[in-house]
Amino acid sequence: MMRLGSGVSAGSQQEPSSPVDLAGLPARIWRSLVVGSRDPAHGFHWPVLASLRSPGAPDARTVVLRHAEPADRVLLIHSHRRAGKIGQLQTWPSVCLVFHDPASRTQVRVHGEATVHAQDALSAQAWQTLPAHSRGLYRGADDFAVLRVVAGELDWLLLDPAGHRRAGLRWSAGGWQSGWLEP
Ligand SMILES: Cc1cc2nc3c(=O)[nH]c(=O)nc-3n(C[C@H](O)[C@H](O)[C@H](O)COP(=O)(O)O)c2cc1C
């Protein structure tokens, strides 16, 4: 477990932090992602999506997390079919999504693979659920795309005044393999 990262002090008056159950961490993270997908007031609603614009040249932008499906390790983001990121992801599908919830002082980094869905069943289904004001961002359903990210690794960081805690989770053999990371 990581102790006392830079800039954070833990004086003797600090309460001991509550223990974090490593085995329960995958469910805890996915619960937060589900909440974040539904609640614009939750920090996890507004992740940064990082991609490559060419090999060795990273790109990143703020997006909205529209849906989280823990059972399938899936996160959905809406976009315009002609947005720059679409071509990037079709060429280099590996992505990193960075979530930060200031209220719980939690950061989650999701590494995964993205697929672009436009003019297919998934994008049509998502289009049906879009409110009119969201549809207005597009000329029509043909312009609309869904980015489907399947998570392969999660990096969880809790900024705890009594000692930061960080864990890495990797999807392997049908389950999340978790371990504490330091720093
Ligand atoms: C708060 C906020 C939320 C955004 N949400 C999305 C989104 O859900 N999908 C999207 O494609 N762009 C979203 N954008 C715009 C992107 O950040 C970006 O400017 C745009 O998609 C063009 O990026 P690209 O050229 O890399 O495709 C959002 C921007 C902000 C500031």
Image (spheres, helix red, strand yellow):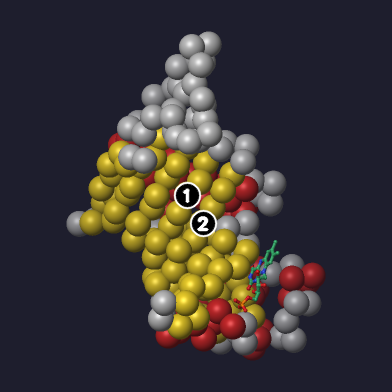
Q: Which mark is residue 98?
A: 2
Q: Amino acid at mark 2?
A: Val
User: Residue at (53%, 11%) from the top-left corner?
Assistant: 13
Q: Is residue 150 visible?
A: no
Vertical placement of residue 65 versus 30, above or below: below
Is tag 1's residue or tag 2's residue first in the polypeptide sequence? 2
Nearer to me, 37 or 57? 57
Q: Which amino acid, by three-letter code, is at mark 1?
A: Val
Q: Secondary structure at mark 2?
A: strand
Ligand 1 - quadrant of the structure image:
bottom right
On screen, residue 121 above or below 113: below
Q: Quadrant of the N terminus?
A: top left
* Disc 2 packing (10 Å; few <14; some 14–19; many ≥20): many
Q: Examine the rendered structure and indicate whether residue 76 appears above or below residue 90.
A: above
The residue to which callout 1 is attached is 108
Lateral position of residue 15 relative to residue 165, left or right = right
Find the residue positioned furthest to the top.
Answer: 13
x then y, percent, for residue 62: 62, 64
Do the residues under discs 1 and 2 have CB atoms within 8 angstroms? yes
The residue at 56%/48% (across/down) is: 100
Q: Quadrant of residue 134?
A: bottom right
Local SS, label 1: strand
6 left or right, relative to 168: right
- Residue 156 can be seen in this image: yes
**Residue 90's spot in the image, x, y percent?**
45, 84
User: Residue 19's x, y, as percent?
Assistant: 39, 24
Q: Position of residue 14 (x, y in %)?
A: 51, 15
In front here: 102 or 81? 102
Tell me the quarter of the image containing the C terminus. Answer: top left
